[in-house]
Amino acid sequence: MTQTPRRVIHTGQAMVDLVLEVDHLPARGGNVMADRATRYAGGSVTIVVAAARSGAAAVLAGAVGTGPNGDLVREVLEREGVEVSAAPVEELDTGVCVVLVEPSAERTFVTTRAAERRITAGSLATSAAAPGDLVCLSGYTLFEPTRDPLLTWVEGLPEGVEVVLDPGAPFATFDAELVERVLARTTVWTSNAAEAAELVGAEGPPADLCDAVAARLPEGAVVVVRDGPQGCAVRVGDETTPVAGFPQTPVDTNGAGDTHTGVLCAEVAGGRGWVGAARRANAAGAIKVTRRGPATAPTSAEVDDFLAVR
C-alpha cells in the first residue's frame, strides 16, 4: 500500500510585502526617499514556498482575498505548486506589510489587517489535516479575530498531527492562559533566540534555551532555536544538538526565518531527521539572505550544491 505523503500545512497570514529600500529610517514626522520599491507575496507564503521548493506537498489553509494583492498571492502559490484549500474571501483584498529595509539588511515593518484575517474553523478544516502532517501556526494569528477560530480548529486536530509553533515576537506578551493553551498543543517549537528567551524569562545560548523551552512543552516535543548566521540548536528527546550555520553577507534578511521553518518542515515531512533537516534549513536561510524578497527560498537542488562545497 502506498503511504500518503506527509504535508506541510500553514494556517498563518498570506500577505503582500511592499518592500522599500532606504538609506535610513525617517525621524518621527520625517521623510526619506526609497531607492527601490517592490511588491512580493510574503507572510506565510514564504514558508509554504520554501517547503514546496524542498519537495514537500504544501498547503495554505489561511484566507486569501479578492483583488490585486490576493491575485498576486494565488499566482505565486499556483506557480510553486502550493494548494490553497479555502475559498477566496469575497469583496475584500489581502492586506499589505510595508517593509523598510536598511543597507545593513535590518527590517522595520508596518502591517495592515484585511482578508487574511477572515478565517473560520471551517475554512481551516478545508486543509483536511491528517496524522503525520505538519501544521504550522504563527503567533501573529493569536491576535483577534483569528485567535478563537484557530484554537478551536487546532484543539480538534486528530492525534498524530504535528503542531509546529513559530511564536513570533508577540507570543510571550499574550496572557498566561492563552500561552499555556497553545503550548499544550505544540509538538514542535521553532523560533529565534530572542523569542525563546522571552518565553522562559532568561537569556542564554541556544542550547540552554532549547532545554528551557522544552520544559514548557508536552513530553517529547521538539525544540529548534535559531541564532541567525551562527545556526541553531535542536532538542529531540533528551538530547540537544548545536547545528552550525553558514554566515553570508546579507542583502535582505526578510523571510530568512520563515525560509528556515519551511525547509525544516519539508525535510522532516520527507523523512529526514530533525538535526539533518536543521542543517539544510540553515543552508537555505544562508542562501535566502543573499537574495531580495521574502519568498526567494532556494530549491532542494540549490541546497545540495551549496552544501557540497562546505
Image (cartoon, grey):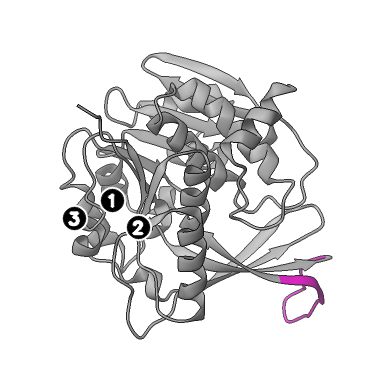
Q: Amino acid at mark 2?
A: Leu
Which residue is rendered at x = 17% and y = 35% of the image? 159
- Which of the two residues, 170 or 73, is positioned nearer the viewer here? 73
**Residue 29 percent location from the top left of the image:** 73, 82
Q: Amino acid at mark 3?
A: Thr
**Residue 98 percent location from the top left of the image:** 61, 70
Q: CA distance from mark 1 to mark 3?
A: 13 Å
Q: Tell me the element at label 1.
A: helix
Question: Pointer 3: what residue?
Answer: 152
- Say if the magenta span includes residue 33: yes
Which circle, 2 or 1, is nearer the viewer? 2
The N terminus lies in quadrant: top left
Q: Are marks 3 and 2 in contact (CB under 8 Å)?
A: no
Q: Tell me the element at label 2.
A: helix
* Residue at the top extreme, as displayed: 239
**Residue 166 percent location from the top left of the image:** 44, 45
Tell me which segment is drawn in magenta: 24-37
Which dot marks residue 178? 1
**How many C-alpha atoms fall within 10 Å of the one at disc 2: few (<14), some, or many (≥20)?**
many
Q: Are marks 2 and 1 in contact (CB under 8 Å)?
A: yes
Which residue is rendered at x = 35% and y = 26% of the image? 215
Which comes before the other along the chain, label 3 or label 2? Answer: 2
Which residue is rendered at x = 26% and y = 57% of the image? 150
Question: Pointer 2: what residue?
Answer: 142
Is 106 situated left or right of 59 in this image?
right
Q: CA distance from mark 2 to mark 1?
A: 9 Å
